[in-house]
Amino acid sequence: MTLYLKNAVYLDWRSREVSPTDLAVDPGPDGGVRPGAVVPAQAQRGADDRVLDCAGRLVTRAFACGHHHIYSTLARGMPAPAKTPTNFTEILQYVWWHLDKRLDLEMIEASALAAAIHSAKCGVTFIIDHHASPFAIRGSLSAIAAAFDRVGVGHLLCYEISDRDGRGPRDEGLAETDAYLSGGGQGHVGLHASFTVGDDLLKAAVELAQKHDTGIHIHVAEDRADQDDALEKYGLRVVERLEKAGLLALPRSILAHCIHLSEHERALVSGSGVWVVQNVESNQNNNVGLTGYGWMDGRVVLGTDGMHCDMLRSAQAAFLCGQATEGLGFDAAYARFRAVHHYLHDFGARGDGDNNLVVLDYDAPTPLTTENFLGHFVYGLDARHVRHVVSQGRLIVEDGRVTTVDEDEVLGHAREMAHRLWDKM
């Protein structure tokens, strides 16, 4: 089956060259896209071939999220915590750890389906997720993967293993990760953060990542409390501790946030092969501080940290924040937005090929050209422009509606699960 996109204005995501053309999109996780293809007459098409007229709309590579927390999907509008948090650790204690302890597999599946729908409608066709549900661990990664597959969104998953809930959930987290990766699931070994991860767990996580030839996905120095804890307990700063444990020798690792790092820690991270993910809006929401990432030599991807599913919004937030923190330019902001594709390619992940495309109904009041595209990217494009989305060569959003699942049914069930979760809280 081949999908033909006719009358497209194609933006090559690498060169940023803009040109009118027809496209042939091949199916499957390894499929590609062929600009300049000739759309065959109806009599010459295969039985499953399809032609979609883009009517002069902008077509480009779809988007990917470098760090999500889909378990937070049912949090929107939830009741306020019993006690108002006054710092970051209390936000975790009174909000997120209070929520994640009450999740069950049905809620997790509902969260994943809803998040996948919202992501797809924002043009996001691949998600790197960091999951937590300490009393519903077994089968959680497979449930998320199956939900993402139903919608048609690619994924690289992990469970956020921690010592914060005791030995039982810690060991279950290790077992779930081992089982998921052993069964062929794409993923990382997930850890929460240094201040909830003891030495035994850190050692076990590194060994598990080595066993499966993957990386570790962990929050690093999101708040100063992480550094204070590491210095008090181990006499080391967070990155020094991770480096000593061998984590920085795993180039597929992702370090989320990395806000409160010393110059020595930055040198350790940038000198290794690991990647950093920036989550500006979440950092602002939690009032943990902001920083620049120019020291990372390009290995910086963008995430949402569970705040939402809109990567265009995340990119624009990173650009605006970067004006003050590092003098970030248009080209650097766009490179950071697209760096996740390079990460996934280096990882060897399936499902983020060139046949992931977004068709944008971009009603610009000014011309869009190869030379000025970045100005449109920073100040013009947003999720409301997403008209159609192609994932692995398959049309999963058409005219703004997901085609693979019943949106109304999925979101209706999610609302039922939200009520049940809130009652438990």
Image (cartoon, rainbow, N blue to C red):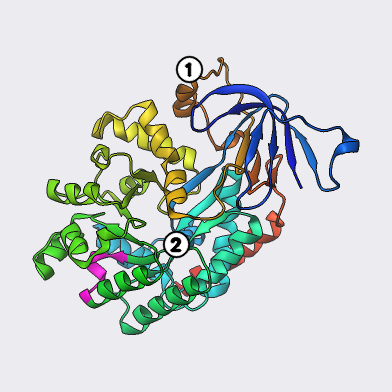
Sequence-first tag of 2 and 1: 2
Q: Position of residue 331 (x, y in %)?
A: 39, 28
Q: Which residue is mark 1?
A: 371
Q: Position of residue 130 (x, y in %)?
A: 42, 61
The answer to whether residue 103 shows anywhere in this view is no
In terms of secondary structure, where does tag 1 sit? loop
- Residue at left offset 51%, top offset 75%: 104
In terms of secondary structure, where does tag 2 sit? loop
Magenta residues (range)? 192-199
Residue 92, above or below 325: below
Residue 383 included in the magenta stretch of the image? no
- Report whether 93 appears left or right of 352: left
CA–CA distance in space, label 2 to label 1: 48 Å
Residue 50, above or below 422: above
Q: Which residue is mark 2?
A: 79
Q: Position of residue 305 (x, y in %)?
A: 40, 53
Residue 193 included in the magenta stretch of the image? yes
Mark 2: few, some, or many residues within 10 Å (few <14, many ≥20)?
few
- Residue at left offset 54%, top offset 66%: 144
